[in-house]
Image (cartoon, rainbow, N blue to C red):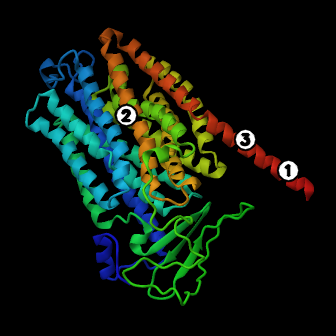
Amino acid sequence: MAVRGPPGIRFLQWLGLTPCWDRQKVYQLWTLFLTFLCYTSYHLSRKPISIVKNELHKNCNTTQNNTNTANCSSWKPFDGSDYESLFGDLDTAFLFAYAGGMFFSGHIAERSNLRYFLVLGMLSSGLMTALFGLGYYWNIHTVAFFVIVQAVAGVVQATGWPAVVTCVGSWFGKGRRGFIMGLWNSHTSVGNILGSLIAAAFVSEAWGLSFVVPGIIIASVGILAFFFLITEPKEVGIVMEDKGRKDSYTVQADGPTQHIPLCERCFNEESETETTEVVPEVASLPVVADSEPLLGEEIKPLSGGPSNPKAISFLGALKIPGVIEFSMCLFFAKLVSYTFLYWLPKYIKDEEDYSPTVSGDMSTLFDVGGIVGGFLAGTISDFTGGRATCCVVMLVLGAPMLYVTQVVFQTKPSTSTAIGMLAALGFLVNGPYALITTAVSADLGTHKSLKGNAKALSTVTAIIDGTGSIGAAVGPLLAGIILNKAGSEQRAAQWDNVFYMLMASDVLACLFLLRVFVKEIKGWCTGRCFEQETSNVT
């Protein structure tokens, strides 16, 4: 059999280092790990700006550790009274460019080599991230330089999400998608945490390194992905099919063609079983080297769809049931999440008078809660089948939690209380956001109305996350505008207004899912009534 796939995998095959057990599982786990690493590095490279803000403009009146005014100089042009507006310009340049790039990246991704597309984006992202930090060493004080770098960074960062979701979606069926992607989606929070810690380690001494080091990291991971990322099963001679909650695959080999069904879930919801039954090769359909595997009638490519499906149009993707509702929900959910991503360290510093380093470290607790929230949301939605219901429950609880956090932080809480509040808030805010951007996007991208057209996944993912990214741009922008209207003595009142905006956004996100939520509830009621009628008959 001729070896295919990325050059690193081909080299390992040439050395004879092939998986000694279930090939599919080995490649699934490897793809899951490498895409996790890729998107962790994406978020790692986005986080430094929120940490460095406290160093670009220092509040010498409230920072306890900076009593010497000579050591409290801010970085021009962020040393004026309009610094918050300038910070808002940086966030807006990145996020609106990211949102715009997202809508195009899905179309480009499904029409190009996915591995090349992802790697090029990672190398470009590393360059732009490092370039922002080099402004420190080149002594650049022109706001246009930083805005342009942020805008270009936003465009190239948009390459990541459609690519990694498509890779994972092509390897895993719907049955365990919420659990797997809920766990996998912790890369967002892990990247934020690592980005915060790395940036905080350098911010007080040389803030340029807070960008240069993450830039080197994402570029290095991009090189690793070029050599070893397997974007779809057929690259290594595996053809998978997804029938509801059942994954099966065919292995192209020199010997008989093997049809191996995996993880069949019985109707009576017994535990998953795994078999490795081998179906003899049909004599009239031999396996030919350097060609796509020829399938018997019992094996259908990707849920019975066409072998070479055409890429779906933008309008065609919008017609898929649920795409618009979940897109608008994500708009407001991501508005809340990204406002915290960019402004939480500043909020903690203003309310608690911590140093920039401590504020950055404290902000990671929000992401720790987000890891748990995303994982549980995916797991529970797998068990219940109610993606929208899980989102609605967490959004309903999220609005009161925002209010409680606002009130508690005004009282200067103890460190342990602040830790608990931030973790709980991250749990409720990032749970729906994580579920929609992963399992929901993958489900809709492989919806039955597409008749097996797997190429729709990149476009659907780009539409949903692109719409959410517009909200991610609007949130930090509005926060900057609100805070810029206040002097230092009115800062607490303006932070209250920011939280009111976030509460309203949380409620709106919930409202957009009401139709899907009601449909899921009706489906459960209908199923329960059917079970009762069946038991009465028997």
Disc 1 element: helix
Count of numbered badges drawn on the protein:
3
- Can you tell which mark lies on residue 138? none
Decide: few, some or many residues near mark 3? Use Cα within 10 Å; few <14, some 14-19, many ≥20. Answer: few
What residue does disc 1 label? 532
Disc 2 element: helix
Q: Earlier in the sequence, mark 3 or mark 2?
A: 2
Q: Quadrant of residue 289?
A: bottom left
What residue does disc 2 label? 341
Residue 236 position in % (x across, y down) = 40, 73
| Vertical relation: 304 (above or below) 477 | below
| Residue at the spot 48% in from the left edge and 87% down from the top edge | 286
Q: Quadrant of residue 129?
A: top left
| In the image: residue 185, left or right of residue 203 | right
| In the image: residue 271, left or right of residue 178 | right
Disc 3 element: helix
The one of 277 and 430 positioned closer to us in this rendering: 277
